[in-house]
Amino acid sequence: MTAREAVRAVLGERWGGAVDEGAAGEAYAPANIALVKYWGKRDEELKLPVAGSLSVSLGDLGTRTRVRRLGAGAGEDEVTLNGRRVGGGEGFARRVGTYLDLFRAEGERYAVETENTVPTAAGLASSASGFAALAMALDKLYGWGCTARELSVLARLGSGSAARSVEEGFVEWRKGEREDGADSWAERLDAEWPGFRVGALVVSGAAKGVGSGEGMRRTAATSDFYALWPARVERDLAAMKEAIAARDMARVGEIAEGNALAMHATMATARPPLVYALPETVAAMREVWAARAEGVGVWLTMDAGPNVKLLFGAGDEADVRRRWPGVRVVAPFG
Ligand code: PMV
């Protein structure tokens, strides 16, 4: 099944609805950080994962997007990122255009304005919130009235982790079994945790090396250790849900940190090796472990880049801020 067919399957009779020139839809979606990671696809085109994953959404750090239908005769989409018009040849505009191709009728063109409230320098991924906001804005534009589950499936077709950015709070993305991906969607867990904190430590603004798609392919194809990954995720998912239900910060931190390090171990054993950590990353990791040895309740997680995210409870926030004066602290539950 192609991604365009998957969109058709979700929308059913709503597919192909026309809207007036100039009609617009606008939406906001939060960024998210995975506590149990997604790394590897069972279907490249539909972005279906090998295993489930679980994240926390980052509240008002995310993406606001407005989509407007351009009039007949518009030659190409008009894409704006943080107030700057992005040329059609740039990676961002190409990814947006490819995603819009899944929805557009022949000759239809859009103006897409995207504002990231995630400071670009904060090292927090914006593709997840970006595709979630775009899917939600298209839903508003066309008036489909999609359910959260449908929005999650549509967002997934832009970027896997975007499936989790259509919801706030703790979110679990079920891997699903079906070939068409209709059962691979993310759902909010029924768990408020006002004292939960995420900290972003920017250790380097260096441009990203190998992107997540290529990184996943390479790891799955060449790392012997990757065979261990799906079972590890299943175990971590079950334990993480229990730890969240118990509001047990130490358990959540241990599972999340262990899961991230296991993911990075599979990457490091790929050929050629994939190592996202820089010397500054390793130094920051050691600082986290030193802080913990001194009794601070802080754990780390990392994604496909050199920056480190801290996980801690409100009771340790003062200590964390003292140790890392540059940390950007997020309270996902307000
Ligand atoms: O959605 P993608 O293709 O950008 O992949 C995200 C992969 C990680 O950020 C490393 C892990 C995750 O679950 O978000």
Image: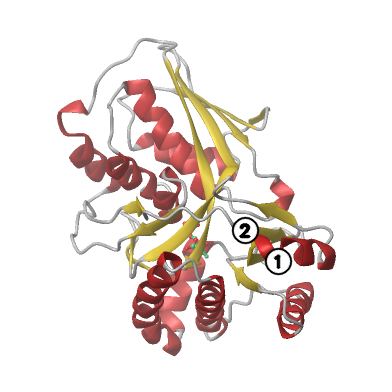
Q: Nearer the viewer, residue 19 or 71?
A: 19
- Decide: marks 2, 1 in contact (CB < 8 A)? yes
Left or right of 130 on screen, residue 118: right
Amino acid found under the numbered disc labelled 2: Arg
Measured from the top left, where is residue 304 in percent x and y?
A: 58, 66
From the viewer's perspective, tell me whether residue 86 is left or right of residue 52.
right
Ranked by sequence position, the earlier of labels 2 and 1 is: 2
User: In the rendering, which numbered label is found on residue 286?
Assistant: none
Say which of 294 and 306 sits in front.
294
Amino acid tagged 1: Asp
Instruction: Find residue 91 and report its image quarter.
Output: top right
Q: Which mark is residue 197?
A: 2
State how far apart marks 2 and 1 are (Cα): 9 Å
Query: Residue 134: percent from the left, percent from the top?
Result: 45, 35
Report helix, strand or loop for mark 1.
Answer: helix
Compared across the picture, whether 174 is left or right of 263 comes to: left
Which residue does the image show at 44% across and 88% down from the upper left?
225
Q: Is mark 2 within 8 Å of ligand 1?
A: no
- Identity of the residue furthest to the bottom in this view: 224
Residue in the picture at 30% in, 53% down: 185
Q: Which mark is residue 316?
A: 1
Indicate whether 191 appears above or below 87.
Answer: below
Residue 301: percent from the left, percent from the top?
Answer: 60, 70
Front position in the image: 141 or 189: 189
Residue farthest left in this picture: 13
- Asked if 23 appears above or below 210 in the picture, the reply is above
Q: Secondary structure at mark 2?
A: strand
Residue at 28% x, 41% y: name it: 150
Give the colour scheme shown. secondary structure
